[in-house]
């Protein structure tokens, strides 16, 4: 059963039970003269009207967006919830006025309640129905994100307490004759039914406040703080390189509409920007089901002058690469920096000594470092030449070596040659749950083990599939 069908079924179920309870309470209320039960009967009649409105709202909200309503028809559910709030206010007003009139009346008949087992039976039935109905509506509302069903669920949940108050009221009225006439207990128990109706009115007013504030907030496109926080957290975890500079989330029925701006490099190509925006939209949709997202790319013109950025920029000015940066403020107050320098593998240290020392001096001066330790490594960006021929069964050898290592079967094996320089790229399935460190360790071990088992005809590089 699809989402719209489930919402419709839940709404119609609520209508049927509201009709049954309203009719039964009205009959019993007239028979007993109980204001508490009559107020519950009127309450259930309005429940019936509200439930019918919910059926209509759910049906309209399910209609797709059109020319006149490009954001769909979901707001009808919030309008219906607001209408239900107004109906409940009228109910509370009537109950309060009737209760005050009975309490101020000098006529003993105004407070009379006829004892009947039917009164107890209908209230117990009402509580049982409302418990199950509230649970069902709450579950479906949560699963389908229906504002109208959520309003009904909250409404019927409070009905349970109001019915319990009425049950206590008619119980008090029933045992009033067992007390001493003129005593404070007799006075209270005679009026217990009226006091119970005031409790019902108070609960109705509380529901009105909650539903009204939520409905008005949604109709005025109040920011969904929970949804916004979910999007920000997910972006920070999954796409930290594109900081969110602005985020707005609004709801229309069961749909989210997200408007966000992210910072990207100012030199980003339009095609790449489009791909990034698509990826962000997919990510947001995974957090907020069915969300429609508009992403604005905000060019970050000025990159932060972090120590890492300064070190890399200085290294490039001397024409070598760096990695493995460590920046540490020691317990004795010193600022220590350790850097791995990438130099041509065939060059002598003497030929690069001046550049190395110049780089060290600039890092010390720019970052006011006390110690700059440099570790020299060969630049691996140049492939070693091999005089050996590529085996005809190279791909089979690679797969056999992967199986022997217990590694995932490669999704592709490609070899790229430039004269006697060859690079073999082996792609394996994505392992997104690994940390960067775990991924690096895993791929490095695979590279090393494969290089040991395969002929030295090409450099091996294991990477993840796109």
Image (cartoon, helix red, strand yellow):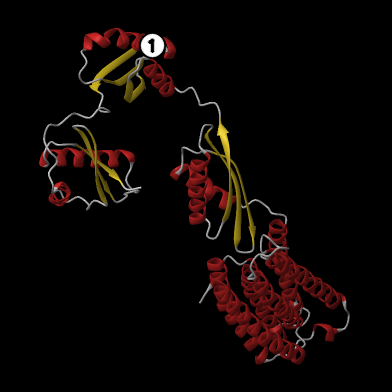
Q: Nearer the viewer, residue 307 or 175?
A: 307
User: SS of the residue at dot 1?
Assistant: helix
Vertical position of residue 61 compared to residue 334: above or below: below
Q: Nearer the viewer, residue 222 or 353?
A: 353
What residue sits right under mark 1 in the picture? 364
Q: Nearer the viewer, residue 351 or 231?
A: 351
Identify the image quadrant of residue 72. Answer: bottom right
Vertical position of residue 60 compared to residue 404: above or below: below
* Residue 186 appears in the picture as rendered: no
* Residue 15 appears in the picture as rendered: yes
Identify the image quadrant of residue 455. Answer: top left
Report x, y in % for residue 395.
Answer: 17, 49
Query: What residue is shown at x 48% (from left), y 51% (from top)?
Result: 283
Q: Nearer the viewer, residue 401 or 257?
A: 401
| Badge 1 density bin: few <14, some 14–19, many ≥20, Cα 10 Å | some
Report x, y in % for residue 166.
Answer: 68, 78
Query: What residue is shown at x 58% (from left), y 79% (from top)?
Result: 9
Q: Is residue 329 left or right of residue 254?
A: left
Vertical position of residue 138 compared to residue 233: above or below: below
Please identify the residue farthest to the front as the structure is shown.
419
Q: Is residue 247 left or right of residue 191?
A: left
Q: Is residue 267 left or right of residue 216?
A: left
Report x, y in % for residue 48.
Answer: 70, 80
Query: What residue is shown at x 80% (from left), y 72% (from top)?
Result: 90
């Amino acid at each position: 059963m699809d989402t719209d069908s489930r919402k419709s079924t839940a709404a119609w179920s609520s209508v049927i039970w509201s009709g049954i309870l309203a009719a039964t309470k009205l009959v019993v209320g007239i028979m007993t003269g109980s204001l508490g039960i009559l107020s519950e009967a009127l309450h259930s009649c309005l429940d019936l009207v509200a439930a019918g409105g919910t059926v209509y709202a759910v049906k309209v909200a399910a209609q797709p967006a059109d020319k006149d309503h490009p954001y769909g028809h979901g707001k009808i559910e919030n309008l219906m919830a607001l209408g239900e709030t107004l109906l409940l206010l009228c109910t509370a007003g009537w109950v309060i006025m009737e209760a005050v009139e009975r309490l101020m009346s000098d006529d003993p008949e105004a407070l009379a309640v006829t004892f009947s087992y039917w009164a107890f039976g209908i209230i117990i039935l009402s509580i049982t129905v409302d418990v199950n109905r509230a649970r069902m509506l709450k579950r479906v509302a949560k699963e389908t994100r229906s504002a109208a069903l959520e309003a009904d669920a909250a409404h019927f949940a409070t009905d349970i307490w109001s019915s319990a108050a009425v049950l206590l009221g008619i119980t008090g009225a029933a045992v009033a004759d067992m007390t001493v006439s003129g005593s404070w207990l007799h006075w209270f128990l005679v009026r217990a039914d009226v006091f119970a109706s005031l409790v019902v009115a108070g609960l109705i007013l509380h529901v009105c406040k909650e539903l009204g504030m939520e409905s008005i907030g949604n109709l005025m496109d109040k920011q969904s703080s929970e949804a916004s926080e979910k999007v920000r957290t997910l972006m920070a975890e999954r796409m930290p390189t594109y900081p969110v500079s602005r985020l707005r989330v609004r709801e229309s029925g069961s749909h989210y509409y997200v408007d966000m701006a992210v910072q990207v490099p100012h030199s980003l190509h339009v095609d790449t920007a489009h791909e990034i925006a698509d990826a962000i939209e997919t990510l947001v949709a995974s957090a907020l089901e069915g969300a429609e997202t508009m992403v604005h790319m905000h060019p970050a013109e000025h990159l932060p002058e972090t120590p890492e950025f300064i070190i890399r920029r200085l290294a490039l000015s001397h024409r070598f690469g760096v990695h493995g940066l460590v920046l540490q403020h020691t317990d004795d107050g010193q600022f220590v920096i350790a850097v791995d320098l990438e130099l041509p593998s065939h060059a002598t240290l003497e030929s690069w000594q001046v550049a190395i020392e110049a780089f060290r001096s600039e890092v010390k001066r720019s970052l006011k470092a006390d110690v700059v330790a440099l570790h020299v490594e060969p630049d691996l960006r140049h492939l070693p030449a091999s005089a050996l021929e590529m085996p005809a069964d190279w791909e089979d050898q690679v797969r056999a070596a992967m199986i022997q290592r217990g590694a995932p079967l490669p999704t592709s094996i490609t070899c790229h040659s430039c004269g006697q320089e060859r690079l073999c790229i082996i792609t394996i399935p994505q392992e997104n749950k690994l940390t960067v460190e775990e991924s690096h360790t895993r791929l490095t071990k695979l590279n090393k083990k494969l290089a040991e088992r395969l002929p030295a005809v090409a450099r091996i590089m294991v990477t993840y599939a796109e």
